Image: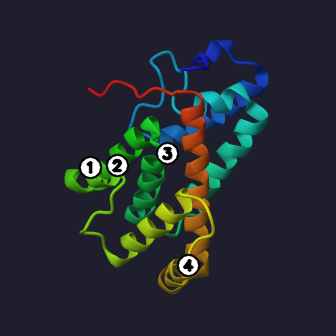
Amino acid sequence: MRLPLIAPQDLTPEQASLYDNMRKGITSNFNDFIAVREDGALMGPWNPWLHEPGIGKAIWDLTLAMTANATLADNVRQIAILVVGASYNAAYEIYAHIAVAEREGMSAERLATLVADVKPADLSKEESIAYDMAYALSRGGTLPEPVYRLAVHTFGQHGTNELIYLVGLYALVSVTLNGFNVPVPERE
């Protein structure tokens, strides 16, 4: 870890305001995995965001907006997020979203295949399109036209937009995690 975790009592006023907002959101939306140390320090991408609260708040606001305005099914979202995490080999993102996907009933075989950066054979049509979009976007360049058209036909324009933004958000999360070498907590 390249940035030390910040205990709540050591936060600046600007950090404390962001901390309170993030802690509330973590408690209500991100509780399938370890995100808070015993002393209250935030782990995962939240710690780097706290170190730069002006930027961190903007990223956190985007995260909240993506969660609050989600219209895609959770399984479709998790497929895309795990594809991005695998593409970037972002250990904490993979750890966290495996926990979310497990709670949602995703099989161990499917999870193993996804994090190996391979397309599972048992995806639904919607999951397959989410995989293809996330896979293509994570490798750079323009999203191929047939994939884009299929997504619009399947998810509508709004759902396609949401999926593109979701891939972008989790690419940002992955780069944050990798750039600051954020470790994965021990699983019990």
* Secondary structure found at label 1: helix
| Amino acid type, residue under disc 2 in the picture | Val
**Residue 70 location in percent, x, y?**
54, 64
Q: In this view, does 139 lie to the left or right of 104?
A: right
| Tags 1 and 3 touching, CB below 8 Å | no
| Tags 2 and 3 touching, CB below 8 Å | no
| Residue corresponding to mark 4 | 148
Write the residue at 69% across / 33% down.
18
Which image quadrant: the C terminus?
top left
Residue 129's quadrant in the figure?
bottom left
| Residue corresponding to mark 1 | 112
Point out the residue furthest to the top here.
Answer: 10
| Amino acid type, residue under disc 4 in the picture | Tyr
**Residue 8 location in percent, x, y?**
62, 18
Q: Nearer the viewer, residue 86 or 94?
A: 86
| Residue corresponding to mark 2 | 115
Q: How far apart are the two marked residues, 2 and 1, measured between alpha carbons?
A: 5 Å
| Amino acid type, residue under disc 3 in the picture | Tyr
* Secondary structure found at label 4: helix
